Image (cartoon, rainbow, N blue to C red):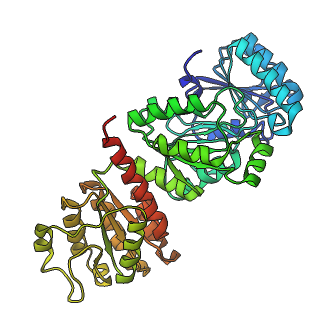
């Protein structure tokens, strides 16, 4: 079996079932490849046309006079086997099969999917799908997908590798990431996993230098042992895996089976597997994105000692409670830190942890920076959390700009929790564009930091 790097970086792509209507499934990949700057060759394939989007259109795959690395197939199911036969004749190594109607449709669909699998295996063709929405390699500008998320203005290259067995939820995560200025290294919709499966893509991300953390949206595992081996390699390489497993309930498992033909086992098995292999399990798509972003943004912390600075004493108390819930420690600041900041504290505050910095610091970004830097340099802390309760437009933006400027120079990971309304949206955007992990819900913030620190501690344990 050949490696799969060429799947993510194809030099040439054929679009089988290409359409001159660039809003249809046969036209969207051509439009998105052009729009996002793909530099390779594109070969539309459809006997109905001579030209599509300024490109020569070929009647069959075998009529293309040049080598093809990847075929995108989005045609009616009854025509797919013939297209695969042409791929075999043309010696095309990779196929992304958009077409649906296979294992998710019951026993007859499973038999047809198995027939296709056997043919592909004998022909040496590696397949993504069926029933998937494709792959997006942001760094290579390879948008081999028809997902509506690609209507965005530009891709945001990043460090999170996202693998999703659900195309719809995957598109939700992709677009939410864009809205938060969180970049992905690659987006992979694996669909029914006729051939290539989650474990194969995990292996790819373990070796991919542009990927720092891996986010999974799982319905089931085709080969649990293969997944375990890939997860172990990821842990050895220090690439955290964050997983959202759907189908926890009986009704959820039924829904997964009707969607991709997934035959998901009891949730307790997955829970035990995730714990054993140091996979951070989350329960919502926002958590999946935010925890993966925290891992991708920073080197691992030294431990689980957290400093909390808050503009509200009540919020500080809430975060302290949540820190306890997620097994995070809140040590007091060191004597040198207290001495450095003695003359800066407001009359109504004291230097402790959580530290109530009061709202008056919103009027003085320089003084606020002194606090932030002192706590970040304190050897008693491993992670720094700032909690804001202020929403005034101009002041929040000034403080956000200051945080964005100094955060790259801090020696500790910095997380911002800002649970206020959209009046402060410019400040949010400032932090997001600077790559500062931003949370809008205290519980989600502390949960994410808990995942972050627990993984770091496990990495330091003897093998």
| Residue at the image position 46 percent from the left and 33 percent from the top | 232
The outermost residue toward the bottom is: 347
Asked whether the viewer can see residue 397, the reply is no
- The location of residue 335, given as percent across then percent down, is 11, 69
| Residue at the image position 73 percent from the left and 40 percent from the top | 262
Return the residue nearer the eye: 8 or 63: 8
> Is 147 on the left or on the right of 331, as rendered?
right
- The location of residue 8, given as percent across then percent down, is 56, 29
Return the residue nearer the eye: 434 or 192: 192
- The location of residue 22, given as percent across then percent down, is 76, 41
Quadrant of the drawing holding the N terminus: top right
Eyeballing the image, is 24 above or below 429? above
> Is 376 on the left or on the right of 95, as rendered?
left
Q: In which quarter of the view is residue 459 placed?
A: top left
Quadrant of the drawing holding the C terminus: top left
Q: In which quarter of the view is residue 56 placed?
A: top right
Q: In which quarter of the view is residue 392 placed?
A: bottom left
Return the residue nearer the eye: 347 or 224: 224
Asked whether the viewer can see residue 84, the reply is yes
> Is 60 on the left or on the right of 440, as rendered?
right
- The location of residue 63, given as percent across then percent down, is 77, 14
Eyeballing the image, is 131 above or below 63? below
- The total number of labels drawn is 0
> Is 458 on the left or on the right of 30, as rendered?
left
Eyeballing the image, is 448 above or below 42? below
Return the residue nearer the eye: 284 or 430: 284
């Amino acid at each position: 079996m050949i490696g799969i790097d060429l799947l993510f970086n194809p030099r040439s792509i054929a679009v089988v079932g290409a359409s001159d209507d660039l809003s249809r499934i046969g036209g969207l990949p051509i439009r998105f490849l052009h729009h996002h700057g793909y530099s390779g060759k594109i070969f539309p394939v459809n006997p109905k046309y001579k030209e599509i989007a300024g490109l020569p259109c070929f009647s069959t795959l075998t009529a293309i006079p040049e080598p093809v690395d990847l075929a995108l197939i989005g045609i009616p199911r009854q025509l797919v086997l013939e297209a695969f036969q042409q791929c075999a004749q043309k010696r095309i190594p990779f196929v992304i099969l958009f077409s649906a109607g296979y294992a998710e449709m019951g026993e007859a669909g499973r038999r047809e999917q198995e027939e296709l699998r056997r043919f592909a295996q004998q022909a040496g063709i590696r397949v993504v799908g069926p029933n998937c929405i494709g792959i997006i390699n942001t760094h290579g500008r390879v948008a081999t997908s028809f997902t509506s998320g690609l209507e965005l203005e530009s891709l945001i290259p990043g460090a999170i590798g996202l693998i999703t067995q659900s195309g719809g939820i995957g598109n939700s995560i992709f677009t939410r990431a864009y809205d938060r200025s969180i970049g992905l290294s690659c987006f992979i919709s694996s669909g029914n996993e006729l051939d290539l499966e989650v474990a194969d893509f995990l292996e790819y991300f373990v070796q991919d230098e542009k990927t720092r953390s891996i986010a999974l949206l799982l319905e089931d595992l085709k080969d649990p042992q293969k997944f375990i081996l890939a997860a172990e390699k990821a842990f050895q390489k220090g690439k955290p895996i964050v997983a959202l497993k759907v189908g926890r309930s009986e009704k959820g498992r039924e829904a997964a089976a009707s969607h991709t033909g997934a035959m998901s086992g009891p949730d307790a098995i997955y829970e035990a597997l995730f714990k054993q292999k140091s996979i951070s399990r989350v329960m919502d798509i926002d958590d999946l994105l935010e925890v993966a972003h925290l891992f991708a943004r920073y080197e691992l912390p030294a431990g689980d000692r957290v400093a909390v600075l808050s503009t509200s004493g009540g919020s500080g108390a809430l975060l302290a409670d949540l820190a306890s819930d997620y097994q995070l420690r809140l040590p007091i600041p060191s004597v040198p830190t207290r001495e450095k900041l003695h003359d800066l504290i407001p009359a109504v505050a004291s230097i402790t942890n959580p530290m109530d910095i009061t709202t008056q610091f919103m009027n003085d970004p320089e003084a606020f920076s002194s606090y932030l830097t002192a706590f970040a340099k304190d050897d008693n802390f491993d992670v720094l959390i700032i909690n804001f309760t202020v929403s005034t437009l101009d002041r929040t933006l000034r403080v956000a700009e200051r945080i964005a400027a100094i955060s790259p120079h801090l020696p500790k990971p910095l997380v911002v929790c800002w649970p206020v309304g959209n009046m402060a949206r410019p400040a949010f955007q400032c932090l997001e564009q600077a790559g500062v992990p931003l949370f809008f819900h205290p519980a989600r913030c502390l949960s994410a930091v808990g995942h972050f620190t627990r993984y770091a501690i496990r990495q330091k344990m003897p093998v």
